[in-house]
Amino acid sequence: MLYSVKKIHLIGIGGIGMSGIAELLFNKNFFITGSDISDSPNVQRLKDLGIKIFIGHDKKNITNSELVIFSDAIPKNNIELKEAFNKNLLVYPRAKMISEIAKLNNSTVGIAGTHGKTTTTSMVGNILQNLNLDPTVIVGGVVKSLESNSLLGSGETFVVEADEYNKSLLHLNPTIAVINNIDFEHIECYKNLNDLKNTFIQFANSVPFYGKVCICIDYENTKSIIKKIDKPLITYGIENLDADIIADSIKQKKGKTTFNVVIDNQKFFVNLAVPGKYNVYNALAAISVCYTMGINTEKVCNALSSFRGVKRRFDIKSKKNVMIVDDYAHHPVEVSNVIQATKKNWNKKLNVIFQPHLFSRTKKFHKDFADALMKADCVMITEIFGSREKNDISISSQLIVDEMIKLKHPNVSFITFDKIVDKVKSIATNEDIFLTMGAGNIWRCSEELGKFFND
């Protein structure tokens, strides 16, 4: 293939979305370099592939680059980003680059929704790969069956996670769009819930007339936008029997979930190796995409049984002695869903260690987080992971702790990050589940605890 651009540099290459782009472009025979502020498993994985990565940012890092891609976490005054503009290089944000990659394929499936994007995207990719349709996939998590967050295929379909942060999903013009759910989120990007809804409406209406929008109608926020979508629809749900695709007879036990899918008055059995009613919704979304593509539903449901999950999504690190689980949940709805799934599947004492993500999110949702955490038997809350936000000393995790005390939770406390591992080691018994949750670096604790209790 003729490429007028060959040398591509990624600023913030270690991010979960950026690393997937880097790997896919590397496999397309582009010359890839990258930089990040620190080493990480993603950086190491890319280095092992042969990609040159600089730790730390320096304008010398882009000396030979023709195109520079930057992640949402990169500030405008980043030295490499400024140098790229000064040199009049092509400069794309991550979302635009994904839309450019989509042009390499005949059809694009864009998976959107406040929750479940990563898992649903992974499910669709897993099904298509299992059925030898050879998709290209970019997902915001490491898919266990791939040990990667991207897959370069020779088939016609590109499957991608469509992120609402910074309205990134509007860079895409998918052939099939999924809207799994809508909850108010990313308050730094959206004025209110209606602003967020309008972005999802715009995303849905970017689908061509011959495409389709797959949407869950069990949630009021998704159901409320349907009349404003002027493209063909297919609906799915559990509670709403008017949906085109319905799940019933849901059963959960020890991390396994089974249910029936009803389509066109036919029933198909699904056996999932992941827990939670929320994963049934994710599976329904994946099934609706494949149904739209004209793939045999029985084969699709059978293929779902091979889905092993995504790292950091109910990721069991140890169950030999003490059970250690890690999850990316960082919104009150997600926290509640994961706690409910754990309680439904295991009759053990549930200890949650929660790392709030972002000062703005903690300020806005601290009461909702407190409500969501109330069903855990023991709750430890650590410092806020500020990520892209500047430190705000007026906002702390104590907001959640104090609210839970007001609600009379019998066992809630603050714990500093450096004390977590030793604390768990000192109190854990075989009757315990320790669940780490958050979008920051809390996973490091679960990794260490998993290794300790597996020995």
Image: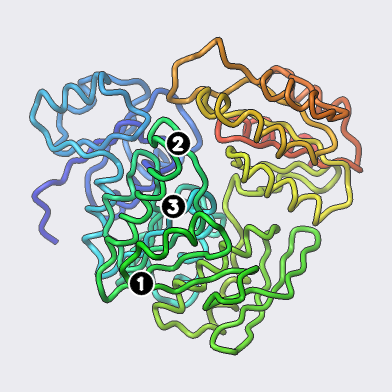
Query: Quick check: 199 above or below 455?
Result: below
Residue at 77% across, 68% down: 251
Secondary structure type for disc 3: strand
Judge the density around disc 3: few (<14), some (14-19), many (≥20) Cα neighbours within 10 Å: many
Residue at 60% across, 75% down: 246
Residue at 65% across, 68% down: 239
| Residue 282 vs residue 417, the one in the foreground | 282
The residue beneath circle 1 is 212
* Image quarter hosting the C terminus: top right
Query: Quick check: 359 above or below 208?
Result: above
| 53 horizontally vs 370: left or right | left
Question: N-terminal of the two: label 3 or label 2?
Answer: 3
The residue beneath circle 2 is 186
Secondary structure type for disc 2: loop
Report x, y in % for residue 6: 16, 46
Tell me the number on the disc at residue 46. Answer: none
Q: CA distance from mark 1 to mark 2?
A: 26 Å
Judge the density around disc 1: few (<14), some (14-19), many (≥20) Cα neighbours within 10 Å: many
Report x, y in % for residue 302: 60, 78
